[in-house]
Amino acid sequence: MSNRVPEDDEVKRERAADKAAERARLVAHRGLATWGEKLVPLGDFRRAAAESGSVLTPAQRAAAGEALLAQCEDSTPIEGPYDRIAVCGGIYNNHLALAAFLDRARAEGAEALYCLGDLGGFGPSPEKVWPLLVDAEVRVNQGNYEQSLASGREDCNCGYTDPRDNHFARLSYEYTARGCSSDFKSWMGQLPARRRVLVGDRELLLVHGSPRRVNEFLFETATSTAYLEGLLDQEGADGILCTHSGLHWHRRLPSGRDLVNVGVLGRPANDGTPRVWYAVLESTSDGLGVHLTPLDYDHQALAAEMRSEGLPPEFIATIEGGWWTTCLEILPAKERGRGRF
Amino acid sequence: MSTPNVSLSSLDTLWFQVAGTVCNLACTHCFISCSPTNHTHEMMDLATVRTYLEEAATLGVKETYFTGGEPFLNPDMEAILEAALAFGPTSVLTNGLLLDPERCRRLSGLSERSDYSLDLRVSLDGYTAEEHDAIRGAGAFGRALEGIRNLHSAGLNPVITVTEVYDENGSVAGKQRFFDLIAGLGITRPRLKMMPVFQIGAEAERHAAYESWQRLSETDTPEGGWDHLQCSNSRMATGQGVWVCPILVNEPSGKMGERLADTLGDFPLGHSACWTCHVYGVSCRT
C-alpha cells in the first residue's frame, strides 16, 4: 500500500495555475519595456532615457573629473622631518605586544612613535595600554573604537550579518567599555583623526581607516590602484598610512607614492603564526623605505591573562594559533581564502 | 514637501548592467522585472565596458560590480571580467544557473591571474526548494546549489545573497538557517549578504507597491547628510548611458548622462525606492 497522500483537485489546479503564470512571466515582455511597473513600447522607454540626464562637452567633463578629485584643504600641522619613525595599528588591549613594540622601535632607532587607533576590544585589561602609550610619548590617532567609547555608544557599530560575529563584537566592546575609566575615555575623545608627518622629504598622511572614513577597510585585494592614486591626489600627500582592516600590506603606486596598511598589534595576521605586525618608515636616498615588520611577544602570557579575565576561548585560540576565528565577514574573497576559517 | 538632493562625495563603486534586463529566470520579486524577453536594457559588450573602465581609472574608482539580468548570459562576460580584474576588485551577481564546472574552473583561473579579489554572489531566496522556487521558478533551487558546489570545488568561495522576500529570512534564526545550508554544502568559510526587497517592478505585483508616504523629504535629512546612501559614492553604467544606482535602471529619470563625468552632480531622492535605501540602510555592495 502506498503511503503517499493523493493530491486533491484543488492542489492540482493550483499547481497548474502556478506553471501557467511562470510561463506567462517568461514571455511577458516581448517588444515591450518595463518602465517602473508599467509595460510600454520599447521605443517609448528608449526615447525617454535618451532625453534624460545631462551631456557635457569634453572640456566640461575634464573639469568635472578634476573637481571630483580636487585637493582638499587640510590644516593638520606637519610633524617632523624625521629620518625614521615606527607606526603601529590597532592594539586591541594587547599591552604585551605594545610593550614589545615600544622596546623594538626604540632599539631600531625610531625618532617618533605613532599608533593609528583602535586601542581596545578583543584582549584583556583595557586600561593597561594607556600608561604605556603616555610614558613612551606615542602619538595616537583616534580610531572608530575610541570614537564609540568616548561618545558613549552602546556598541562598536560593526553591524555584522552573522549573528555569531555580532555576539562576539558586542561582548568585546562591552568588556572594553566596562574596563576603561572615564578619564581614559575623555583622553580618547581628544585624539586627532589624522596627522601629517615628514619622513625625509616625503609627506605622509596618517589615518585610521582611510582619509575619507574612519571605518573604511583598505584590503590589498579589494582596493584598486586608481582609487589610491585618487586619494593621494586629493590629500596632496606622498603616502598614506592606515590600519583598521587588521592585515598589513604595502603598495608602491605607479606615481611612486605609497599606501601602507601597518597591520595591527592586537591579533595575528590570520596566517597561522602568533606574531603581530607594525611598520617602520625611513628616509632613503631614493625616497621612502617601507619595512613591514613581524613582532614576536609573550603571547602565552596574554592568553593566560585572557583566560583569567573570562574572555571567549575563540579569541584566545586566535592569539595562540594565529588564525582569525570571528568577525571574518569583512574579509575579501582572497584574504578570506588564505585563513583557516 | 520638497525633495532632498544627494551629492556625489566620491565615485568608489562602478556598477555595470552587463546583461541588461535579460535573464533566464523571471523571478516574482525582481525589482526590474527581468525575464528572457525583457530588453528594456540590452547586454553590454566588451568595448563599451572598457570605455567605462578607462574613464573610471581617471575618477579614482575603487571596485566594480556586474549584474543584470543574468551576467553569464552575456557572451562577452569572461573577457569583461578579465578586463575588470586588471582594473580592480570585481564582483558578479548571478542566479547560479550557468555555473557549470568548466566555467567555474575558468573563473577560478581569472581570479588567480589577478592581484584583486573576484567575488561571485549567488542568490538564494529560500532555504528550501519549495520557498526558493516559488519566487524563482521550478528547479531553480537545485541548479543554484549545484552552481554553488561547482564554485566551491573550483576554489571560489561565493557570497550567498538572500533577499528578505520572506520576513523570517532577515531574523537571527533565519540567517542562521542560511549559514547552516551553506555549511551543509561543505563550505567551511560561509559568506552571506542580506538585502531588503524593493517594492517596484515585479515585486510591486507579487507583494505590494509603495504607499504615497514612503518618500523622502528635506525634513528626513540626517545630521550627517546623505553619505550613507550608495548614490553618494557609486554609479550604474548601462548600454543606454549612466544611471544613478542599480535600483532605478527601469526609470528613465534615473539616467544621469552618457559618460561617468556627466553624472558627478546631485540627484533628487524623489523615488520611493530611495526611501527603502534610507530606512533600511541598504547598500547593494557586499
Image: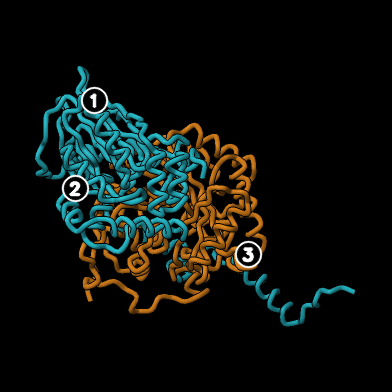
Left or right side of A261 for A28: right
Local secondary structure at mark 1: helix
Q: Nearer the viewer, mark 1 or mark 2?
A: 1
Labels 1, 3: one chain:
no
Q: CA distance from mark 1 to mark 3?
A: 61 Å
Chain letter behind tag 3? B
Whether residue A61 appears in this view of the structure is no
Locate residue A208: give its quadrant: top left
Colour in which chain A is drawn: cyan
Q: CA distance from mark 2 to mark 3?
A: 48 Å
Locate residue A15: give its quadrant: bottom right
Colour in which chain B is drawn: orange
Kindly identify the amino acid type of the residue bearing the numbered disc 1: Ala
Disc number for residue A193? 2
Q: Which residue is mark 3?
A: B128
Residues marked 1 and 3 touching at CB (< 8 Å): no
Residue in the picture at 63% in, 39% down: B102
Residue in the picture at 55% in, 38% down: B108
Q: Which residue is mark 1?
A: A107
Mark nearer the N terminus (1 vs 2): 1
Q: Position of residue B247 (x, y in %)?
A: 40, 61
Local secondary structure at mark 2: loop
Labels 1, 2: one chain:
yes
Kindly identify the amino acid type of the residue bearing the numbered disc 3: Thr
Packing grade of label 3 (10 A; few <14, some 14-19, many >=20) is some
